[in-house]
Image (tube, rainbow, N blue to C red):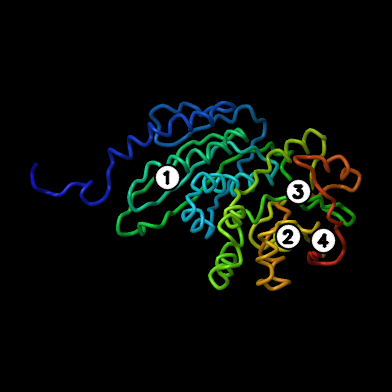
Amino acid sequence: MSGKLTYKESGVDTREAAALIGDIGTHVKRTQQQRKLHGAFGLFAAAFDLSDYKQPVIVTGCDGVGTKLELLLEHQGYGIAGKDLVAMSVNDILTTGGDPLMFLDYIGIAALDKPMITALIAGMCDYLEDCGCILAGGETAEMPGIVPEDVLELSGFCIGAVEKPDLVDPSQIKEGDVLVGYGSDGPHANGWSLIRRVLAEHPDTLSKDEIVELLAPTRLYHDVVKDVRAAEVTPKAMAHITGGGLPENLERLFQNGLGADLEIPYWNNAPMRKLFEHVDAEDKFHTFNMGIGWVCIVDAQDADKILSAGNGGVALGTVCSREGVRVVERQSN
């Protein structure tokens, strides 16, 4: 030994990082069953052949897991974090009418943790395999002294494509159109700063099992989109209900003074009902998805055709000639 410093001694082990690529290879291959990269060998960037599309329009999205990640790390929900990361971006791609083609991830960590990262990648690949999207690459950055040891930085990026005539066009929305909502699997990856605040100030509100229940991954809505297409219905808009809840995510779709009056089902989620006891009654509608994670807006004559899409939807209300989205929740039985 020369007695001089090495990269490994400074906290970065490039050989261990290279070995990790081999460890996750089986998971990556799972995402290449329905689609393949183009000329992948030896490239420093991923390529995808769009020649099967006649008029391809590229659509992109990026997102993270937000402050939910703190509790996921605490409860070792690494695979859930991977699924959340994929769903937050892929769902946004699906709202355009596009096909999710390639996904990339960024992981920033103080020191390489192979079991944690492998579990993250496995979770990503579970969802990517489901929707036929390729894990095309990513970056795992060891950053000792920059990223704290108990912190993980996590970002996801999705690239999709859609035929130009099939691009969803919210400008076609008109008064009388129907909004059909599809259930969430909990609060997904939004509203966790408020959840964490409630838990910090009222630590006895939820048990450990109830917290774990709330950590269920964000639902991937490719099944809904697939079934809507099979019903030969063209939605005028589709919305992924994330931060801002139903009002903010739907209002961005309306123009020319349009809005909607919605009556949503009672959210029969016991841990969330306990949390609501400490949350402003109005603010909850602007923070959480309230049990509805996806909304399709269709012509009134098409509503019945898509109510059975995915795990089944529910008519929430209609587009009206008054600005803004107003939401009320039905009372429990």
Whether residue 243 is visible to the viewer of this picture, yes or no, is: yes
Whole-angstrom CA distance, mark 2 to mark 1, is 34 Å
Q: Earlier in the sequence, mark 1 or mark 4?
A: 1
- Going by the numbered disc 1, the residue's amino acid type is Met
Disc 2 versus disc 1: nearer the observer: 1
Q: Quadrant of the N terminus?
A: top left
Give neighbour class at mark 2: few <14, some 14-19, many 20+ (Cα, 10 Å). Answer: many
Give neighbour class at mark 4: few <14, some 14-19, many 20+ (Cα, 10 Å). Answer: few
Circle 4 — which element? loop
Circle 3/circle 2 CB separation < 8 Å? no
Q: Which residue is mark 2?
A: 246
Q: Quadrant of residue 289?
A: bottom right
Whole-angstrom CA distance, mark 1 to mark 4, is 41 Å
Q: Which residue is mark 4?
A: 332
Identify the mark at residue 116; answer none if there is no mark: 1
- Going by the numbered disc 2, the residue's amino acid type is Leu
Question: Which residue appears at 55% of the width and 73% of the height?
Answer: 201
Q: Earlier in the sequence, mark 2 or mark 1?
A: 1
Q: Which residue is mark 3?
A: 182
Q: Earlier in the sequence, mark 4 or mark 2?
A: 2
Circle 1 — which element? helix
- Going by the numbered disc 3, the residue's amino acid type is Tyr
Q: Quadrant of the C terminus?
A: bottom right
- Going by the numbered disc 4, the residue's amino acid type is Ser
Tell me where residue 129 appears, x and y as whole percent.
58, 33
